[in-house]
Structures are given as structure tokens and as C-alpha cells.
Image (spheres, rainbow, N blue to C red):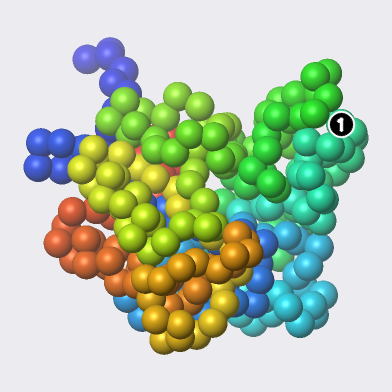
Amino acid sequence: EGHRVRLHGLYHGGKSKGLVLLNWDDGDLSHYTIFNMLRQRGLVGNFSLITEKLKKGFPAYLTDAQLDEMYNYGSDFLPHSDSHPAGGLAVLSASDAMYELTESRRKLLEWGYPRAADIFTWPENAYDSNDPNIDLIALARQAGYVASRGSKGSYLPTAQGIDQPMRLPSVDLGGKTLAQAKKYIDAAELYGQAVIIYGHRGVGTETTPAAGGVPPANTIEWYLSDYGGLLDYAADRVEADAIDVGTYSDLRQTFRF
């Protein structure tokens, strides 16, 4: 009585259970195909959106109806800046960076997508400004964010809790083979950690080229056939009760950030 207990881990069968967050950046039209691939396998994903490119009828980006369908299914939408400036927010003034932070969140809230609107995904995965006098993490906190994703590091040691939710690490699929991508899931399972795996544009079809070959030379692309292979692998590990595949909302619910 009178004691406060804080839980710092998710345990399953005597050890922490791996959690995989699958994340796609930008809001590219191919993400609707990827969403359907997730849904067919009973999985859920996370989508980081460049808000300037949405709700305006850009043909290369997700439509209003697709966004609504994806969100209502359970996908988390994260702000990924309003315009995704070249070089990321690291090259901007403090006022311009604050505009990108606040405007992207404001639009998601206005459009009725609040679930993960206070978790930011850094353009270019850079959360350190080129100007030593600008603290982008501090600006993000001022803008109302409780967590943000960059690309430094890889796994979240969930058994020990999450010490720096404003600097969530992640791994990029760009330039990696399907076999290499599966190893991220294997490691999350083996060590009972969480991993955020992110990609960008899906290319090709779900069957061509054959999965498991050389990845596209353009590192913001990954073959849809390889995505299918990766999602099949993740679904199999979920079916075996070895890992969970979830959302940022799941992560925050567990660790209360």
C-alpha cells in the first residue's frame, strides 16, 4: 500500500517478447497496396505522412478514401513533416523547423487521425540540427510530441524500458535483401526486443521480380514481392506466438510515453 510500481518490460514465457513495428514513410500511393498485403495476413502497419502531399489529390500519393480505410482498420499515421524539405529539418531555421513540426501534426488532427499524431518521424531521419544553437528535440517537445523516430541505433531494449522515446531508433530496408530484413525479426525474437523496420516506395508487383533477389538500386524503393516475403515471415512468427507485430500506439501503451 502506498507504493508506486512502474513496469519496464513485456514478458512472455519467462522472457520479454519481441515486438516488430513495420513503418512506411512519405504516404506514397504504393502504401495502399502494402496496406492490403498487411491486411491479408492479419497484420497492422504504421505510415509516416508528408501532409502537404495529401488531401489535395496528388496522384502519386494516398487518396482521402484510402487514408480513411487504412486508419479505420487500425493503421497508425505519424507526422513526417509538412513538406519533407531536402536535408530534413536539420537544415532549417528554428522557426521553419517548428512550422514543419506543428503543421504536420495540426493537419493529421484536423483530418481526424489523432491516434499517433504526437509521435514524429524525422525527415532524412535526422533529429540533430546542422546549427549547434538549434535543439530539434526540444522544438519537437514544444510542438507537443511525446516521441519521435530517427535512425541512430537499431533495437529498443524493451525489458529495460524505453529511456529516450524522443530518439526511437529504427532500421531502413533500403539496399537490404529479404534475407537481411528477416534477420531483424529474428533478433527481436531472440533477444526479446522491439525493432522499428521502415521502408519507402514499393515497386514491381507482388510476384515479380521473384522475392529474395538483389534489392533495387534506388534505396528508397523495395520490391513488393520482398515485402510479401517479409510479411509472410512476420505473420508466421506471430502465428507461432514468438513475436507481436504492432503499432506505435501499442508501444506507447506498454511503456506509457
Question: On the picture, is 86 further left or further right than 140?
Answer: right
Using the image, determine if residue 80 lies above or below residue 74: above
Q: Is residue 228 above or below residue 255?
A: below
The amino acid type found where label 1 is placed reads Ala
Q: Residue furthest left?
A: 13
Q: Is mark 1 on a helix, strand or loop?
A: helix
- Residue 127 visible at all: yes
Viewer-proximal residue among 100 and 199: 199
Position of residue 249 in the picture relative to residue 59 (left or right): left
Q: Quadrant of residue 177?
A: bottom left
Residue 161: where, in percent of width, then height?
36, 28
Residue shown at the point (75%, 24%) measured from the top left: 135
Residue located 73% across and 78% down the image: 60
Residue at the spot x=32%, y=76% of the render?
41
Quarter of the view holding residue 231: bottom left
Quarter of the rendering occupied by the N terminus: top left
Q: Please, is residue 14 above or below residue 58 in the view?
A: above
Q: What x and y, as percent, mark residue 125?
A: 64, 43
- Residue labelled with disc 1: 94
